[in-house]
Amino acid sequence: MISITQFIRIDRRKSDSLYLQIAYQLINAVQRGLIPVGVKLPGTRVWSEELGVHRKTIVTAFEELEAQNWIVIKPKVGAFVQNPELKSVKSTQLASNLRDSTKNAKFSFNKSFILSSPFENEKSKMVCNDGQPDYRIIKTQELSRFYSGALKRRNIQSNIGNYAIQENDFFKEQLSFYLNLSRGFHISKAHLLVAKSREMLFYTLAKMLFKENDVVLVGELSFFSMNMVFAQEKVKIKTVPLEKDGIDVSYITENFKKGELRCVYLNPQQSYPSTSVLSMEKRKALIELAEEYDFVIIEDSEDFEFNYEKQVDLPMAASNSNGRIIHLGSLGKHLHPTFQLNFMMAPPDFVEEAKKHVSVLNPQGNFVLEQALGEMIAEGDFFRYQKKALKIYKERMMHFESLLKHYFGDLIQLERPKNGFAFWIEFKKQISLTQLAQELKKRDVFLPRLCMYQNKNQTALRLGFAHWNLEEMEEFVELFWEGYKEIT
């Protein structure tokens, strides 16, 4: 029989519980081979006497060891040592020796090149993006108290797992209040559908609005994710020229007949990727054309919450649109991604039908998260966090613009964005953006392809600024300038 005190020493000065000290030291002895697998351990009374601890402490230690599979307890026989790590090693060796029978499917299936992800995985010191917030600004500890509080609510406990309840009415009431206040809407919760991702809303719209060969009109440059989802439905995506004040609305009357267009998709607040803003005259004209030419307007206003102008242009959906506008938006981009949601605002009958599609993809929605966000809005913290973040992002935007003008001067064309998290930078001299990315890579800076826009007439970048603090963006712009000089 093994000597217990040879392997285990109790130190009452440590903060670790006594039973954990015993369990961990026994595990260590087995891992080092000092206690062979299969050895029968002394009884709990013997352990108690030799270590000078209560027998219940030994029983608790044994329970911990058994839970981790370091011992097996046989009733009326005893406790025997085993090593779960040896089993996992043997299992790994066995698996590696087996022929991989699932290397390729033995059946046909549909493949999609349209849905290939544009995102690249890179671990450079500095990573550019197309306009993402800085999740370091609002501490997650502050947000977690809302989530933990929501979990304790009695209505949450009773509704979780009840798939007949797909929405959090409290949240939708708070959201409708927030949107009426911030976007000039006059809506109730019946006008709203909430989803975790924009792509889920795009998918729902594609299923509900389109049939094969329907014509969808988008800007010459537009949001890639939407294009991918809509193209998968085999619609015809056609482009409309972009001007300084948004899409060329007259292009519709000049190139399409009445009834030929099914949908026009745009972001009037900040066109992607060029950040241009659709003028009020064009907005009014587009709404009138939608009625005359019988098409739907999908208004995407993802970054509406972050407007740097004193005078904010309200969404098109806030006007009298005769039920022809579907408004898409995001909520909480200043918060950690876990706390972000997306929504669709549309006529109630359309929303009611759309719920069927979303409920299949996400049966009970985001019930707890919606409760937490609803309470955050009701208590005023949502606005407080947003105001704090907006002040920081505006300072960063001004500083980024100043740095770009200082280094590049007249070599680039850029305008300060009115909202959002990115600049649209056009190079006056034709350069290779691929070569620029290679030079930046040498400096441990990653410039992804989704930020690059280049053809025979245009060389431009959509560069996010919000995810960097002032010191980080100073370092980036200096390296950016060095890379540019190297190829010109």
Image (cartoon, helix red, strand yellow):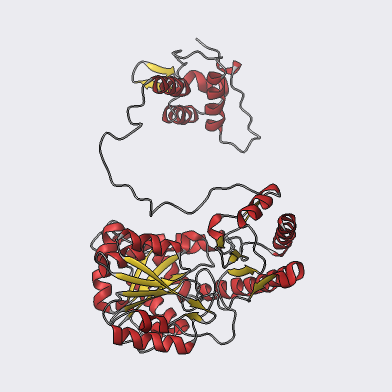
Horizontal side of 91 relative to 143 (left or right) equals left
Compare residues 160 and 328 and report the one nearer the observer. Answer: 328
Q: Quadrant of residue 256?
A: bottom left
Residue 320 drawn at (x, y percent): 35, 89
Q: Is residue 11 above or below residue 159?
A: above
Residue appearing at x 44%, y 29% in the figure: 68
Q: Quadrant of residue 330?
A: bottom left
The quarter of the image holding the C terminus is bottom right
Q: Is residue 125 visible?
A: no
Q: Is residue 175 above or below residue 232?
A: below
Residue 284 drawn at (x, y percent): 41, 89
Horizontal side of 401 relative to 323 (left or right) equals right
Q: Is residue 373 visible?
A: yes
Residue 34 drawn at (x, y percent): 56, 14
Compare residues 41 and 294 and report the one nearer the observer. Answer: 294
Residue appearing at x 56%, y 62% in the figure: 454
Horizontal side of 103 relative to 270 (left or right) equals left
Residue 155 drawn at (x, y percent): 33, 65
